[in-house]
Image: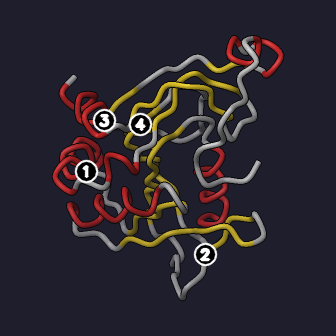
Amino acid sequence: MELINLFKESGALLEGHFLLSSGKHSQKYVQCEQLMQYPDRARQVVEAVAEKVKDLQIDVIVGPAMGGIRAAYELGRQLNIRTIFTERVDNVMTLRRGFQIHEGEKVLIMEDVVTTGKSSMEAAKVIETLGGQVIGIGCLVDRKVSALRLPIYSAVELYFKAYDQKECPECEKGSQPVKPGSRKQ
């Protein structure tokens, strides 16, 4: 419960009317960057993930842009592991900036929030195409929305109800959703 309080104290747990990247609507949203702006809070939350993955023999940590970059860096700092990131070019996840995945490297993907796992699986495809072996997904928050083929190592688990637009109670009230996050629909 202490970690949840760090999210609350940071203003990272939002309430309102949100359009999620999945296209669904929710009355709650986690904006991890509100927590990540405080280094000591970021350290504490990422430490919970580090404890779970420290024995995995990770060669490199990959943070999908945008949300995973700072979380991945902090995990890499704590574990002293090389850390890089993927990013979207024309809405397609790719590896740039001279970053490399070497054949057979064991890779942990590190995210801020895993909801549907779309960004993680896009990053996994890039990593596997380059010969890396994805051994899991670390995250600050696992929203427990979808089952992925990879193990998830999270600091906290949160479940927020998500609605199709036609079933959304906020839409029924006439409210317009806000699109948080960095991914285009």
Q: Quickly name the residue at label 3.
A: 7
Q: Residues within 10 Å of mark 1 (few under 14, many from 20)?
A: many
Residue 40, placed above or below residue 150: below
Name which of mark 1 and mark 2 comes first in the sequence. 1
Name which of mark 2 and mark 4 comes first in the sequence. 2
Q: Please state which of the two labelled residues, at mark 4 or mark 3, is closer to the viewer.
A: 3
Query: Looking at the rendering, which quadrant does residue 45 occupy?
Result: top left
Mark pair 1, 3: CA separation: 10 Å
Amino acid of disc 1:
Ala
Mark pair 4, 3: CA separation: 10 Å
* Residue placed furthest toward the right: 166
Amino acid of disc 2:
Leu
Where in the figure is residue 79, as x and y percent of width and height? 22, 62
Where in the figure is residue 104, as x and y percent of width and height? 50, 70
Q: Residues within 10 Å of mark 3 (few under 14, many from 20)?
A: many
On residue 141, the disc is 4
Q: Quickly name the residue at label 1.
A: 42
Q: Quickly name the residue at label 2.
A: 95
Residue under the image location 65 percent in, 37 percent down: 178
Labels 4 & 3 near each other (Cβ < 8 A): yes
Mark pair 1, 2: CA separation: 25 Å
* Residue placed furthest toward the front: 174
Amino acid of disc 3:
Phe
Along the line of sight, the residue nearer the viewer: 110 or 102: 110
Residue 145, placed above or below residue 139: above
